[in-house]
Amino acid sequence: MSNPQNGAIGVVITLTVRDQDGALMHLTDPGKIRLERPDNTTVDKDAIFPSGIDYQIKYTTIANDLNQTGIWKLQALIIVPQGGFSGPSSRFTMLVEKNAGE
């Protein structure tokens, strides 16, 4: 994926969730994706499963989601029922580029 531009709408963010040993984690609830902006403020977005795949979660950006240029941190917030792991995943990064004239 190329880097999205500031203000881009429709950017699909897909995270693959793995356990501490690197094995895919099959989820029953897609949970949320936390977006941490370059200024360190955060927003949590409802995630969905892409096409029935239960070890990936995705979110598609809407207006005003990608509102800062720089390095964004992405994190899955997951809940595994019946005593399984619940909490944040490792963080991923994404660069949001400036538009011409910015």
Image (spheres, helix red, strand yellow):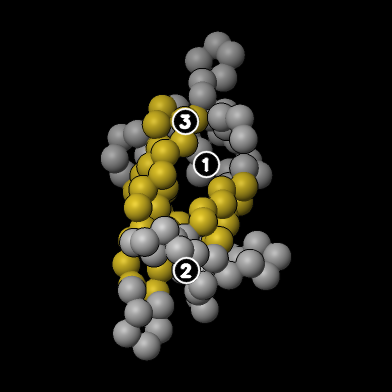
- Residue 69 shown left or right of residue 1 in the figure: left
Q: Which residue is mark 2?
A: 25
**Residue 95, disc:** 3
Relative to 40, say whether 102 is above or below.
above
Task: Answer above or below: position of 40 versus 24.
Answer: above
Above or below, 79 against 71 in this view is: below
Counting residues from the start of the chain, the first of labels 1 and 3 encountered is: 1
Q: Which residue is mark 1?
A: 64
Foreground: 88 or 37? 88
| Quadrant including the N terminus | top right
**Residue 56: x, y in percent?**
55, 61
Label 2 CA crowd tier, 10 Å (few <14, some 14–19, many 20+): some
21 or 6: nearer the viewer: 21
- Mark nearest the camera among 2 and 1 is 2
Inspect the image, locate mark 2, and give the three-letter code of the amino acid beneath it: Met
| Label 3 vs label 2, nearer the camera | 2
Q: CA distance from mark 1 to mark 3?
A: 16 Å
**Would you place residue 88 above or below residue 2 in this image?**
below
Residue at (55%, 11%) from the top-left corner? 101
